[in-house]
Amino acid sequence: MNLYAILAIYLLFWVISAFIVLPFGLRTPDETGEVLLKGQADSAPSNFRPKVVAVRATILSAVLFGLYYANYVEGWLTLERWTHVG
């Protein structure tokens, strides 16, 4: 696997991880007791912290990519194992 493929696959893992960790820790204005601004949605987060989301996504994507790469090198799960009929 070349470097460009590694970077592309890691980036995909990072984006997916960011969407997975995005809702954790968010609070709405109802939960924090803040007053809604005119035009603000009830579900809009009042404590969005993009740095925390980026750190969590980086950690999760590193773990997932590590598992993916280990499987690529070691061949634990392959298409032949799933399609092989006894």
Image (cartoon, helix red, strand yellow):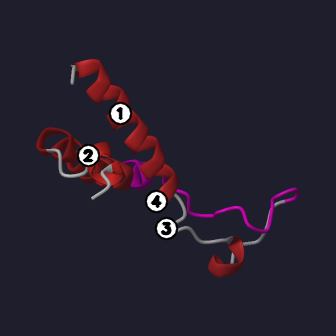
**Residue that badge 4 annotates:** 21
Q: Find the distance from the CA under tag 3 to the CA under tag 1.
A: 24 Å
Element under disc 3: loop
**Measured Cα–Cα span from mark 1 to mark 4:** 18 Å
Number of marks in the rendered image: 4
Q: Residue at x 25, y 51 (%)?
A: 77
Q: Residue at x 52, y 52 (%)?
A: 19
Give the magenta range.
38-54
Between discs 2 and 1, the one toward the N terminus: 1
Q: Is residue 34 left or right of residue 16?
A: right
User: How many C-alpha atoms fall within 10 Å of the one at disc 2: few (<14), some, or many (≥20)?
Assistant: some
Earlier-in-chain disc, 3 versus 1:
1
Asked if the residues shown at circle 4 and circle 3 are in contact, with their CB atoms under 8 angstroms apart, the answer is yes
Quadrant of the rendered structure where residue 23 is? bottom right
Q: Quadrant of the C terminus?
A: bottom left
> Disc 3 or disc 1, which is closer to the eye?
1
* The stretch drawn in magenta includes residue 50: yes
Residue on which disc 2 sits? 68
The amino acid pointed to by label 2 is Tyr
Where does the N terminus fall, quadrant-wise?
A: top left
Q: Would you place residue 56 above or below residue 78 in this image?
A: below
Which amino acid does the dot numbered 1 rest on?
Answer: Ile
Residue, disc 3 = 24
Q: What residue lies at 81% left-to-right and 59% top-to-bottom?
A: 40
Q: Position of residue 62 (x, y in %)?
A: 26, 47
Locate residue 65: give its quadrant.
top left
